[in-house]
Image (cartoon, rainbow, N blue to C red):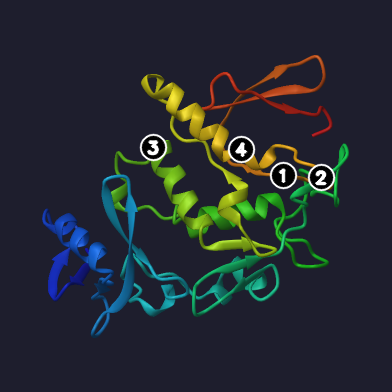
């Protein structure tokens, strides 16, 4: 069980008074310390709805004790090692990751501005060391810490939780100088009683797709759970969970 020093006091991560302490630290812009080693390692506080969550600082995973839930083996010992410095360029000062993708986020006419990776493509392009669509999803999942299971996830791994973690991870990534969070659409958990509000937020999130003037059209990345495919007059209708009444059109050759 992790212990944290927050505003001068020690707390276990299951302490009932932890949320109150995190609220104060968040308002004061103070960093909690993970006490797995020595005088503690700086962490940061993220707000998730009405709760505050302690997150590991970027690039600090291997500094934690191996028994600590915040520990992560060095990138060189994982599949990420081949990507660092090429497809993924990390800024050690800010923790921001500049990503190079092997697919385009713009479209000219009816074709993408550059070839997209096919369904059988590897996660990493062997020639230019760029991330494929699948590779980007893997990296997002990894940085959102959705590949790690802790007792804190018990009974809480709902879509709204997954969506929040993915959105937070995307805030630490840029593609060609543009924040990935502005390009990524992860639908929020649908609730019938909030249908109008959710649909309005969805329209705002997808607003960058609206055509304006000449030149390439912007594309976005959708991360969602596939519910079903339905035949359409041209291609297929892709139905995503939590997005009722809003199918996405997919070409047959995809």
Across and down, in percent, residue 11 comes to 14, 66
Q: Is residue 13 visible?
A: no
Q: Answer yes or no: do the residues labelled 1 and 2 have beta carbons within 8 Å?
A: yes
What is the distance, in whole Å, between disc 4 and disc 1 at their CAs? 10 Å
Q: Earlier in the sequence, mark 2 or mark 3?
A: 2
Q: Is residue 13 left or right of residue 208?
A: left
Across and down, in percent, residue 43 comes to 33, 71
Residue located 52% across and 79% down the image: 92
Q: Answer yes or no: do the residues labelled 4 and 3 have beta carbons within 8 Å?
A: no
**Quarter that holds the C terminus:** top right
Quickly name the residue at label 1. 219
Q: Secondary structure at mark 2?
A: strand
Q: Earlier in the sequence, mark 4 or mark 3?
A: 3
Q: Secondary structure at mark 1?
A: loop
What is the distance, in whole Å, between disc 2 and disc 3 at their CAs? 34 Å
> Foreground residue, 232 or 150?
232
Disc 2 crowd, CA 10 A, few/some/many (<14, 14-19, 20+)? some
| Above or below, comparing residue 160 to residue 122 in the picture | above
């Amino acid at each position: 069980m992790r212990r944290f020093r927050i505003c001068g006091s020690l707390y276990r991560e299951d302490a009932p008074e932890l949320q109150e302490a995190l609220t104060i630290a968040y308002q004061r812009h103070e960093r909690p310390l993970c006490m797995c080693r020595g005088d503690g390692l700086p962490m940061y506080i993220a707000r998730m709805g009405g709760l505050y969550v302690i997150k590991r600082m970027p690039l600090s995973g291997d500094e934690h004790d191996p028994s600590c839930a915040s520990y992560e083996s060095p990138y060189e010992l994982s599949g990420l090692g081949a990507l660092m410095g090429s497809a993924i360029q990390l800024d050690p000062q800010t923790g921001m990751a500049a990503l190079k993708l092997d697919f385009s986020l713009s479209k000219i006419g009816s074709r993408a501005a550059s070839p997209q990776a096919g369904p059988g493509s590897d996660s990493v392009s062997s020639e230019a060391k760029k991330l494929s669509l699948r590779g980007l999803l893997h990296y997002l999942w990894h940085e959102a810490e959705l590949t790690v299971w802790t007792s804190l996830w018990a009974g809480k791994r709902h879509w709204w939780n997954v969506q929040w973690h993915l959105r937070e991870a995307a805030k630490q990534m840029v593609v060609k100088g543009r924040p990935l969070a502005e390009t990524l659409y992860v639908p929020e958990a649908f609730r019938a009683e909030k249908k109008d509000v959710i649909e309005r937020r969805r329209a705002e999130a997808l607003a960058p797709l609206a055509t304006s003037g000449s030149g390439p059209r912007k594309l976005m990345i959708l991360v969602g759970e596939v519910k079903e495919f339905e035949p359409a007059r041209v291609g297929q209708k892709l139905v995503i969970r939590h997005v009722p009444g809003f199918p996405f059109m997919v070409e047959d050759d995809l």
